[in-house]
Image (cartoon, rainbow, N blue to C red):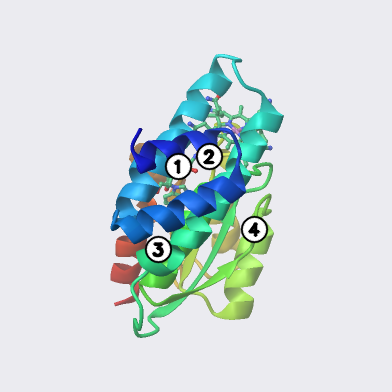
């Protein structure tokens, strides 16, 4: 079995220490960090998601897989983010209220930072007012919201409305993303941009700040 498949399997089993050891070995072998992320970690998490949907695995197993995934992506951070980028501006980022999924958000953070964008990471379960207040307090030009649940997507619309009510809508770009989010949804709620993955989010954010 290839080392990338071994990483995927170890991640699915939630074996964080083994994931880190295998990633070190893969990097030493010259496997690209992008392949480790996409064909190892992300592919493995898709399998976990499919099994979760079919009730073949349950929340505790998914949680330990997610921990192993976050441990793996943290190891890849120095390789995936460009070094020495000039500071471009600030973004506040979070997973919206009611939603505890943070792996995609953490990837978005990594990619934004790689573009030289300072990220105020608000974490998970972030209420709309907190996004807006953080943007005001930190003079952010971008509010970036992640949602993984269809039930929490509407919170993104509330963020847009609160930004309008606080009088900052013309000063901040509001970006949305996450598996259930679509371009059409983003337009419906009046967000400035939807992107389907973390790398595209970073490209679009850098474009807004250029
Ligand atoms: Co959850 N979960 N989960 N879960 N979970 C999903 C999302 C689900 C699709 C699983 C399924 O049924 N197949 C389903 C949602 C169904 C729906 O609403 N449509 C689901 C459910 C139902 C639940 C619970 C309700 C389960 C329960 O308790 N009965 C519960 C909800 C808890 C809550 O949030 N309140 C729950 C809990 C959990 C865990 C805590 C166990 C764990 C999260 C741990 C963590 O994040 N630390 C978890 C996980 C891991 C998943 C799956 C398996 C994987 C999600 C993930 O991290 N993917 C997921 C199934 C799946 O997606 N296949 C599932 C990898 C990650 C890199 O992808 O976050 O999509 P993603 O990010 C992508 C893009 O979406 C994009 O960039 C990334 C790629 O580069 N992106 C952005 C993300 N944010 C962006 C923002 C941007 C731009 C792009 O701009 C700002």
**Depth check: 43 or 208 in front?**
43
> Which residue in the structure is indicated by mark 4?
123
Q: CA distance from mark 3 to mark 2?
A: 21 Å
Image vertical order of residue 103 relative to residue 208, above or below = above
Q: Horizontal and vertical percent for residue 108?
A: 45, 57
Image quarter (top left, top right, bottom left or bottom right) of the N terminus:
top left
- Mark 3, ligand 1, within 8 Å: the answer is yes
| Residue 201 in view | no
Q: Earlier in the sequence, mark 4 or mark 3?
A: 3
Question: Considering the numbered disc 1 on the image, is that residue within a helix, a strand or a loop?
Answer: helix
Q: Nearer the viewer, mark 3 or mark 2?
A: 2
Q: Nearer the viewer, mark 4 or mark 3?
A: 3
Q: Which residue is mark 1?
A: 7
Compared to residue 68, the image places residue 51 above or below, namely: above
Distance between the alpha carbons at the discs numbered 1 and 4: 26 Å
Q: Which label's residue is closer to the chain start, 3 or 2? A: 2
Q: Are marks 4 and 3 in contact (CB under 8 Å)?
A: no
- Tell me the tag on residue 11: 2
| Disc 1 to disc 2: CB gap under 8 Å | yes
Q: Residue at x 61, y 62 (%)?
A: 131
Provide residue 159's location: percent of width, then percent of height.
57, 54
> Residue 173 vs residue 52: left or right?
left
Q: Mark 3 sits on what residue?
A: 111
Q: Which mark sits nearer the N-terminus, 1 or 4?
A: 1
Q: Which residue is nearer to you in this view: 152 or 40?
A: 40
Q: CA distance from mark 3 to mark 1?
A: 22 Å
């Amino acid at each position: 079995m290839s080392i990338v498949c071994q990483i995927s399997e170890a991640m699915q089993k939630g074996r964080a220490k083994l994931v880190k050891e295998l990633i070190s070995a893969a990097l030493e072998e010259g496997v690209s960090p992008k392949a480790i992320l996409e064909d190892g970690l992300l592919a493995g998490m898709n399998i976990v998601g499919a099994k979760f949907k079919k009730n073949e695995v349950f929340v505790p197993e998914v949680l330990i897989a997610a921990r192993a995934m976050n441990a793996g992506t943290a190891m890849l951070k120095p390789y995936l983010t460009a070094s020495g980028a000039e500071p471009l501006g600030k973004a506040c980022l979070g997973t919206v209220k009611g939603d505890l999924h943070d792996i995609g958000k953490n990837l978005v953070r990594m990619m934004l930072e790689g573009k030289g964008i300072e990220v105020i990471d608000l974490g998970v379960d972030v209420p709309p007012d907190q996004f807006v207040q953080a943007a005001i307090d930190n003079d952010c030009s971008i509010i970036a919201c992640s949602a993984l649940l269809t039930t929490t997507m509407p919170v993104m619309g509330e963020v847009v409305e609160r930004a309008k009510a606080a009088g900052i809508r013309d000063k901040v770009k509001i970006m949305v993303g996450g598996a259930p989010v679509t371009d059409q949804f983003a337009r419906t709620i009046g967000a400035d941009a939807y992107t389907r993955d973390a790398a595209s989010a970073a490209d679009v954010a850098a474009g807004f700040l250029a």
